[in-house]
Amino acid sequence: MFKWKDDFSVNIEKINEQHKELFKMGTELYNLVSAKDGVDRYDEIMTVIHRLAEYTIEHFTYEEELMKIHGYKDFDNHKKQHDVFVAKIQSIKADDVDVKQRKIGMDLIVFIANWIENHILVTDMKYKNYLNSKGVY
Ligand SMILES: [Fe+2]
Ligand SMILES: [Fe+2]
């Protein structure tokens, strides 16, 4: 989970860096949630989720600007996927948290990991050749 591989490369340096940063935050989150020493890490976890949400928005905005500037035809559909994910991340409040135990479920982390991986490999990958052909690397 959250392991960067060459398959993830969209051949655009800045975007690859941003994707790597997302993976780093995901790993941080995974480590916090999977620690089994009984320490309450709720506040730390929420802080990372907050940072992840902010960084995700920053990254999506960057991607969307590039796609818009270069007249990428699948822009609307791509942006819609971004918006749905941001809404999901921002909705992580009491409903995804075991309030009594102050625990975030591993299934949430798995959802985030799968979404990011799938979005990069399928949706981001679709702009790779197009943006490269516009001179974006
Ligand atoms: Fe992306
Ligand atoms: Fe994207």
Image: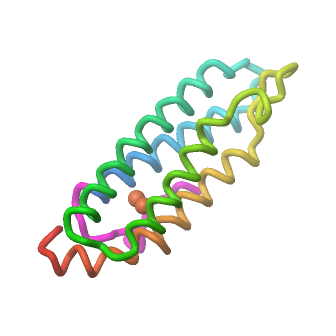
- Quadrant location, the C terminus: bottom left
Give me the residue at 77% from left, 39% from top. Answer: 105
Residue 121 left/right relative to 96: left
Q: In terms of image quarters, where does ligand 2 lie?
A: bottom left
Magenta span: chief secondary structure: loop
| Boundaries of the magenta span | 1-14
45 over 91 or under it: above or below: above
Q: Is 13 covered by the magenta stretch? A: yes
Is residue 6 or residue 9 the one in the foreground?
A: 9
116 over 104 or under it: above or below: below
Give me the residue at 49% from left, 38% from top. Answer: 52
**Count of marks placed on residues:** 0
Residue 136 is situated, as x and y percent measured from the top left of the image, at 16, 68
Q: Residue furthest left?
A: 135
Give me the residue at 71% from left, 45% from top. Answer: 108
Residue 53 left/right relative to 128: right
126 over 39 or under it: above or below: below
Q: Is 23 covered by the magenta stretch? A: no
Residue 13 is situated, as x and y percent measured from the top left of the image, at 22, 60
